[in-house]
Image (tube, rainbow, N blue to C red):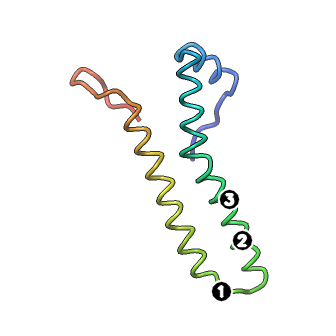
């Protein structure tokens, strides 16, 4: 489980580390390539819950959800790798 975020400190760190232009770029990146995927996952979970309540078959919807989770995870991992600078031998491995 991810650790809790201290949003005030997080916002301060972002403001210190990124220019306003970089902040806008990151915000657009997250909006265009991550948040829509996550929103779709939440909607699919609601659909599956309603289908289960009505005792409808959920296999196809569940398979679609699994695929969409995989796609979202892949997008996030790829974006993270592209944003990180290349590691040098002097840099420690960080998550």
Q: Which residue is mark 1?
A: 57
Earlier-in-chain disc, 2 versus 1: 2
Q: Disc 2 vs disc 1: Cβ atoms closer than 8 Å?
A: no
Residue 13 image-quadrant placement: top right
Element on which disc 1 rests: loop
Assign a secondary structure to mark 3.
helix
In the rendered image, the vertical position of residue 82 relative to residue 53, given as above or below: above
Circles 3 and 2, Cβ within 8 Å, touching? The answer is no
Identify the residue under disc 2: 47
Q: CA distance from mark 3 to mark 2?
A: 9 Å
What residue is pinned by disc 3?
42
For residue 64, which quarter of the picture?
A: bottom right
Residue at 71% across / 71% down in the picture?
47
* Front-lying residue, 89 or 81: 81
| Image: 54 above or below 75 | below
Residue 48 percent coordinates (x, y):
69, 73
Q: Residue at x 48, y 45 (%)?
A: 76
Q: Which residue is at a point 54% across and 30% down the rendered structure image?
A: 26
Q: Earlier in the sequence, mark 1 or mark 3?
A: 3
Q: Residue furthest left?
A: 89
How many angstroms separate mark 2 from mark 1 (CA)? 12 Å
Relative to 36, residue 59 above or below: below
Compared across the picture, whether 34 is left or right of 95 comes to: right
Q: Does label 3 or label 2 sit earlier along the sequence?
A: 3
| Mark 3 surroundings within 10 Å by alpha-carbon count, few (fewer than 14), some (14 through 19), many (20 or more) | few
Tell me whether circle 1 and circle 3 mark residues in contact (CB < 8 Å). no
Q: Nearer the viewer, residue 87 or 20?
A: 20
- Local packing at callout 1 (Cα closer than 10 Å; few below 14, some 14-19, many 20+) is few
Local packing at callout 2 (Cα closer than 10 Å; few below 14, some 14-19, many 20+) is some
SS for dot 2: helix
Observer-nearest residue: 69 or 95?
Answer: 69
């Amino acid at each position: 489980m991810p650790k809790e975020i201290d949003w005030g400190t997080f916002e301060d760190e972002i403001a210190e580390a990124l220019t306003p232009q970089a902040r806008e770029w990151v915000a657009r990146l997250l909006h265009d390539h991550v948040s829509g995927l996550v929103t779709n996952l939440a909607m699919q979970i609601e659909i599956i819950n309603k289908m289960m309540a009505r005792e409808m078959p959920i296999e196809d919807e569940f398979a679609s959800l699994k695929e969409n989770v995989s796609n979202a995870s892949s997008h996030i991992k790829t974006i993270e790798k592209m944003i990180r600078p290349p590691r040098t031998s002097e840099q420690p491995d960080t998550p």
